[in-house]
Amino acid sequence: MTRIKVRSTTWDQDRVSLKEIRNQVFIHEQGVSERLEWDKEDTSCEHFVAYMDNEAVGCARLVGNKKIGRMAVLKAYRGKGIGKEILDHIKRHASQKRYTRLELSAQCHAYEFYRSCGFTAHSSPYEDANIPHIDMELRVFSHDEDSKSQYYKNSDSDIYHGKSHLEAEGYLDILLSQSHRSIILCINNMQHPLINHEGLINRIKIAARANKHFKTYILVSNYHPSFNDTALFKLADRLPSFIEIKTSSDNIPTHWVFDSNAWMDFDGSESRFCYSDRAKIKHFMERFNKWWSHGKHIMDTRRLSI
């Protein structure tokens, strides 16, 4: 049985392994510049390395006894619980050192992972290295297992406004990280940049692999063959069992629903998000079901474009 081992270390002791992991994940995979990646903190902060079969496959660092950063797992080893093992080790380390609080700047698409590890959000999305992030924290000696993080899909009923495209992407990534059962996309304008957001495409792929009952319903206003060139329609061709598309001649809004308890809508540069609002979703679904029943199937998008 493969075992994951995490140990505390220093920059001088494991510089080669730490640089290799971060080079692969942040610089080559995510496009972070070397100027931003390498800073003066590395030589003075605490570091952690995760091993699988004696190979260094993950890392993180702790700055100023509280700020977790540079957490990375090599792509080939993700989904094996390595990230959680790293965080568990850091939490034990913090407890032994009597650190009272851990903080981190999380990429928004990783929100649900960190929330499931006990961290709570306390900021709106912001840009860091051209990627949406949010601030999260964990009280090391707190035993309140029932505390719910901001943006939690089952409890946060506040409405959030995306004031920029990047902020809207962040709110959407937070929402997508928690969506596992169904996604309903009611689309009035296929030209909007959020339509082909990479996080949306990736979430549908991941959910389809993880849940054979997962379903995405897409209702578009006034279908045009040019829609077939979008990432969303191309994905529907690849995953016909998980994605169903219809076109509507009605004047439909752009309104999306996730797992029947969270929603978002947008019009131009304005966007709104709510992570727990079953009452509004119930009202919207009554209208959506009528539009869907009157909509026309797009059975073979590529054939229609000929």
Image: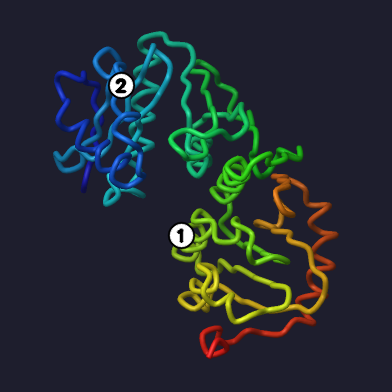
Q: Decide: is 271 above or below 36.
A: below
Circle 1 crowding by C-alpha within 10 Å: few under 14, some 14–19, many from 20? few
Q: Tell me the kind of residue under disc 2.
A: Asp
Q: Decide: is 285 above or below 18.
A: below
The residue where tag 1 is placed is 206
Between 122 and 3, which is closer to the camera in this rendering? 122
Tell me: 204 left or right of 267. left
Which disc, if any, is residue 245?
none
The residue where tag 2 is placed is 39
Tell me: 74 left or right of 121. left
Residue 12 picture location, percent across and down: 15, 18
Tell me: 162 left or right of 237. right
Q: Earlier in the sequence, mark 1 or mark 2?
A: 2
* Visible residue check, residue 186: no
* Visible residue check, residue 195: yes
Q: Decide: is 29 above or below 231.
A: above
Circle 2 crowding by C-alpha within 10 Å: few under 14, some 14–19, many from 20? few
Could you say whether the residue bearing mark 1 is in a helix, strand or loop?
Answer: helix
Between 301 and 176, which is closer to the camera in this rendering? 301
Determine the residue positioned at 52% across, 23% down: 137
Judged by depth in the image, the label closer to the viewer, 1 or 2, is 2
| Residue sitting farthest toward the top | 98
Determine the residue positioned at 54% across, 56% down: 197
Residue 210 picture location, percent across and down: 46, 61
Between 303 and 154, which is closer to the camera in this rendering? 303
Could you say whether the residue bearing mark 2 is in a helix, strand or loop?
Answer: loop
Q: Tell me the kind of residue under disc 1.
A: Ile
Q: CA distance from mark 1 to mark 2?
A: 34 Å
